[in-house]
Amino acid sequence: MRSLIAAVLLLLPSPAWAAAWMRKGGSWEVISSAIFTDARHSFGNGRKPGGATMFERGLLQTDTQYGWNDRVTLVLRTETANVHLQDAGNHLSAISNAVEAGMRYHLGDDLLADYDVLSVEATARAAGAFNFSVSANGQAGGQAAGMRILYGAPFKLAGKEGFVDAELAQRWLTRPRPDETAMDLTAGLWLTPVGMIMLQSFNLFSGPARAPYIRFRTHKLQASFVWRWSPRTSFQAGSYFSPAGANALQESGLVVSLWTDF
């Protein structure tokens, strides 16, 4: 199992970029990602059907993590979004940026079984209109603060090593944007010594909203393959789609990431 823990530290899930595991003190990890999103329809709210739309977004992310010590990991994310949106006869092209910073703290080994991990994370974020989680609520930028609790555990399946990571987060956004509650789940399984498959579920629920924003919920499923290119470098490629939602776009897309550990 110790080899699994080392592998998980190298290959944290994306875009759930935190994950429960900590960086070793004095070590760095940089994840450079390109995420391509496309939507042609939106989900309604149960009483009102969704409509046709055209939404395309290219998102470049750089996630940097540094192990301050074995219990504290510092995190920094930068994003640039390039968006094309057409809805109800209106057409918009925009480029927006975001920056997010915070820290993750290991809550202690005595709370859980061997190799299980429980941690808590706090972040602050400033973002442009299309750098927020819900593209349908893209009218303006703003700020956000968040708290996230994370649980990770290794397992074995048919003699192969794997892990699960479960996360629950609350985000407080500047008004009039609604606050958000996130529930994310990741499972990874090493099919070969250098190849892992990851399955992920990302779920987001808004609180009450004020105009021009609307209450929403989103659900996304993602599958990807991670190839360990070298002991310090890995490559991830995958795709995702939205099977359900309310007042949100029916998104699908591709994800490619380069992971560097040093």
Image (cartoon, rainbow, N blue to C red):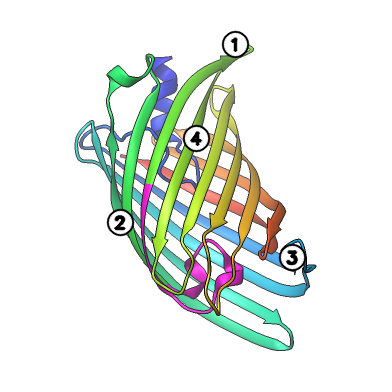
Q: Quadrant of the N terminus?
A: top left
* Spatial CA span between label 1 and label 4: 23 Å
SS for callout 2? strand
* Residue 48 x %, y %: 77, 69
Q: Residue at image x 31%, y 49%?
A: 122
- Asked if residue 96 is among those painted magenta in the image, a careful observer would answer no
Label 3, residues with CA under 10 Å away: few <14, some 14-19, many ≥20: some
Of labels 4 and 2, the one closer to you: 4
Label 4, residues with CA under 10 Å away: few <14, some 14-19, many ≥20: many
* Residue 19 x %, y %: 42, 38
Q: Quadrant of the C terminus?
A: top left
* Spatial CA span between label 2 and label 3: 34 Å
Give me the disc on residue 44. Answer: 3
Asked if disc 2 and disc 1 are in contact, CB closer than 8 Å, the reply is no
**What residue sits right under mark 2 in the picture?**
101
**What residue sits right under mark 4 in the picture?**
166
Q: Earlier in the sequence, mark 1 or mark 3?
A: 3
Which span is picked out in magenta?
128-147
SS for callout 3? loop
Q: Earlier in the sequence, mark 4 or mark 2?
A: 2
Amino acid carrying label 4: it is Ala
SS for callout 4? strand
Of labels 1 and 4, the one closer to you: 4
Q: Residue at image x 19%, y 35%?
A: 69
**Does residue 125 lie above or below 97 as drawn?**
above
Amino acid carrying label 3: it is Gly
**Does residue 241 lie above or below 119 as drawn?**
below
Of labels 1 and 3, the one closer to you: 3
Amino acid carrying label 1: it is Gly
Q: Earlier in the sequence, mark 2 or mark 1?
A: 2
